[in-house]
Amino acid sequence: MGNMRWIDFHLYGDACGVLTATGGGQTIPFDFKRVSYVSDVVANRPGHSYRDTHEVIICLTGKFEIELLDEARSKTYPMEGSHLGLRLLPLLVIRLLRFAPGTVTLVLADTHHAPTQSIRIWDQSLPATQARSAGATPPPIKSAPGSTPTPTISNCASPKCL
């Protein structure tokens, strides 16, 4: 898939352990404004995409799989080891799947958290990715002001899994 790439972080190790250091505009190809993490996952995380956000996803500990969906195909990649990050471009739909117990995932993003920029319904994400591929402006998000759309591509039984 052309809208993602792997980043290999430099590890500094000795008998005491391993240090991984990075910075925005260096190993991470953008200045990040948001750092978030996912932990204590008990179900697959629903699919979503962002209109204008570049992200790097890193599995700090444990393992999981990430499914990437674009206008033409889907592909699943294993995520394990804090030495690799997966850079994602805007309008690429992702789902986080099959978390091992104790897994912690770090996400670095170049935008602040803004729920209105997140597309959480596959039916809305697909036209947006198709428009991007055609060079057009993606269609607007169709949700009521102040509401959070219900995910439709999820194994999560809880409506709070967003």
Image (spheres, rainbow, N blue to C red):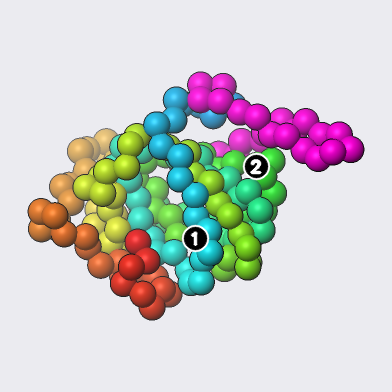
- At x 58%, y 65%, the residue is 99
Judged from this view, the residue extending furthest toward the right is 15
Residue under the point 69% across and 34% down: 20
**Residue 52 in magenta stretch:** no
Quadrant of residue 51 within the rendered picture:
top left
> Can you say which quadrant of the picture contains the C terminus?
bottom left
Dot 1 and dot 2 residues touching (CB under 8 Å): no
Between 130 and 143, the residue placed more toward the observer is 143
**Percent x, y for residue 7?**
61, 36
- Mark before the other along the chain sequence, 1 or 2: 2
Query: Would you name the residue on which mark 2 appears?
Result: 84
Write the start and end of the magenta stretch as one range: 1-26
At mark 1, the secondary structure is strand
Q: In which image quadrant can residue 83 be found?
A: top right
Instruction: Determine the residue positioned at 62% across, 54% down.
Output: 79
Q: Is residue 159 left or right of residue 66?
A: left
Q: Confirm whether residue 45 shows in the render.
A: yes
- Residue 96 image label: 1
Decide if residue 35 is on the left or right side of residue 127. right
Amino acid type indicated by mark 1: Leu
Distance between the alpha carbons at the discs numbered 1 and 2: 16 Å
Q: What residue do we see at 28% from left, 53% from top?
A: 119
Nearer to the camera, 147 or 89: 147
